[in-house]
Image (cartoon, grey):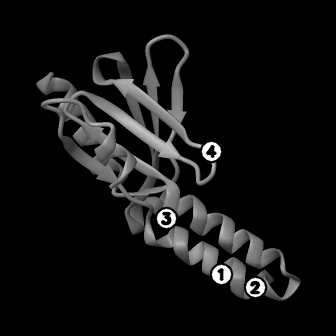
Amino acid sequence: MSFVEKSLGPNEHVVARAHFHWLYTAQALLALLVLGVLVIGIFIFVGMMVRKATTEIAVTNRRFIMKTGLFRLDAKEFSLRNIEGVRVHQGFFGRIFGYGKLTIEGTGTDRYELPIIADAIAFSCAIETAREKM
């Protein structure tokens, strides 16, 4: 059972989940192929794959949840009421291949940058839709 599912409260359900884009895996494989001979490519590949396997990003009908970490758990949660804005960062290739980064800004000084995710615009819309339904 995933961290997000374990942390759901009563009458809370997952609205959307974010996933790493396939280009993230391609970058890790490229590092392995190009730098693997120097051994540093192996460390880069393993590090990127561990990050991908241990990161969960989701929006429920009440909050935003981002969990990272293999040995040490780091969970960031925002109540949807405390989210002031969501910014999408998408470069030229991000527009072509359908990936981007999100910055979620909360009340006060809280700000979280998400890693490169697939279909960042749809995930941003899911956050805004969940906020409106609260």
- Label 3 with label 2: CB-CB less than 8 Å: no
Label 1 vs label 4, nearer the camera:
4
Q: Are marks 1 and 2 in contact (CB under 8 Å)?
A: yes
**Label 4 sits on residue:** 72
Q: Nearer the viewer, residue 97 or 23?
A: 23
**Few, some or many C-alpha atoms within 10 Å of disc 3 (few <14, some 14-19, many ≥20)?**
few
Q: Which mark is residue 93?
A: 3
Which of the 4 image quarters holds residue 83?
Answer: top left
SS for callout 3: helix
Q: Where does residue 112 sit, x and y in percent of width and height?
A: 52, 33
Q: Residues under labels 4 and 3: Cα distance? A: 33 Å
Mark with earlier residue (3, 2): 2
Residue 47 position within the rendered picture, expressed as x and y whole percent measured from the top left? 67, 65
Mark 4, other Cα within 10 Å: few <14 / some 14–19 / many ≥20: few
**Amino acid type at mark 3:** Phe
Query: What is the C-alpha distance between the residues marked 1 and 4?
Result: 28 Å
Q: Residue 31, image x and y in percent? A: 70, 77
Image position of 91 with respect to 34: above or below: above
- Does 81 sit above or below residue 112? above
Name which residue type carries label 1: Leu
